[in-house]
Amino acid sequence: MGREPGRVRAVFVFTGQGCQHPRMAAGLHEALSAYRRHLAAADEAIAPYLGRSVRELILCGDPRVHQTALTQPALFAVQYALAMTLLEEEEVRPAAVLGHGTGEVAAAVVAGALSLEEAARLVCFRGASMQYLPSGGGMMATCASPFEAAEAAAGEPEVSIGAFNAARATVLSGAVDALERVRERLAAVGIAGTFLQVTHAFHSPLMEPVTSRFADAARHVAAGRPTVPYYSTVYGRRYDEPLAGGYWTEQITAPVRFADAARRMLAEQAPSHVVEIGPRAVLTPFLRRMAGTRGPACLAVCRGPGSNAVDLAGVLSQLDAGPLAGI
């Protein structure tokens, strides 16, 4: 598909767990009534399942935002509010969506496959189920190819590939002590490894103990087929089936095939812009490398903890969208 000159065709990419931080998107909350309204709606949907205000957790700078049972609903709430601000207030309509790990839940709402209420229930069950696994698991981002990462992890049965982010960006998931040994092996051949700020070995076989309990809860989540092209990081391609309980159960242990899904989305949708939606820019560098110099512009709604309405206005000006584009 060729791209029409001068025509904005944006796709949304939702960041996964590990990008969270205290006071996520607080600058936007202070400046934008639209963002405040959508965050309040997410908070109201989440509260019956979380038993507390996720908005207060985020804005008061509580370090417990890094606890999995709180991280996942908090991250979802921020992503939902950011996406709805773009969609409803600034009229930025995505041609396709893609989510990395936990980010798939917010992507499913934007794609029309989950309601806000069903997504809130799902993400709270997901986070709570994972929180109570035994400690000792973690994830490590590496500058290794999948082959190099697998070779370094050989002989460590509790380590597997948790995410394929780019040609030389592979995340390993497993027991922390085993990951430390793998990091030493990689360092010996000049390849860096950095532990992510997560509490468990997500997207690995070590998550198996939670799948039965989660499947029972997820069975009752009402879901439909995406009405906006949805690129699955479980399968690494466009996915048109209902995003029901079985999908979300499989997602818990499956590696994140971000690189495959992103490359297919770029090739099949030919976007003019890729917009990363999350509290900090994590995936944008990978997307820029995949897109190349002739590819779409890759933008992050929030670059990091200091992001504010002026930053968002700069993004919108590149998208030629909405009233904020002119401030």
Image (spheres, grey):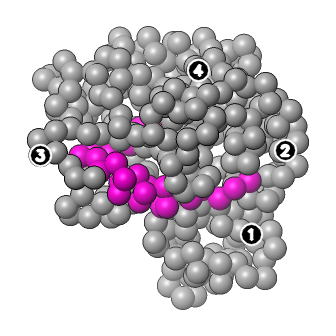
* Residue 148 covered by magenta stretch: no
- SS at mark 2? helix
| Residue 297 in sight here | no
Mark 3 vs mark 1, foreground winner is 3
- Range of residues picked out in magenta: 253-279
Determine which residue is flagged by label 1.
159
Mark closer to the chain start, 4 or 1: 4
| Residue at position x 73%, y 59% in the image | 204
Q: Nearer the viewer, mark 3 or mark 2?
A: 3
| CA distance separating discs 3 and 1 | 46 Å
Identified at 62% across, 52% down, the residue is: 234
Residue position marked by numbered label 2 in the rendering: 210
Q: Is residue 81 visible?
A: yes
Earlier in the chain: of badge 2 and badge 4, it is: 4
Q: Amino acid at mark 4?
A: Ser
Residue type, mark 3 in image: Pro
The crowd level at tag 3 (other Cα within 10 Å; few <14, some 14-19, many 20+) is few
Secondary element under disc 1, as helix, strand or loop, is: strand
From the image, tell me which residue sits under label 3: 5
Q: Nearer the viewer, residue 177 or 166?
A: 166
* Amino acid type for the residue under numbered disc 2: Val
Circles 4 and 3, Cβ within 8 Å, touching? The answer is no
Q: Position of residue 278 (x, y in %)?
A: 45, 38
x and y percentages locating residue 166 in the rendered image: 46, 66
C-alpha distance separating marks 4 and 3:
35 Å
First in sequence, mark 2 or 1: give its number.
Answer: 1
Q: Residue beneath label 4, please?
A: 115
Vertical position of residue 4 compared to residue 177: above or below: above
In the rendered structure, which amino acid carries the disc numbered 1? Val
Report the side of 78 relative to 215 (left or right). left
Cβ–Cβ below 8 Å for labels 3 and 1?
Answer: no
Inter-mark Cα distance, 4 to 1: 35 Å
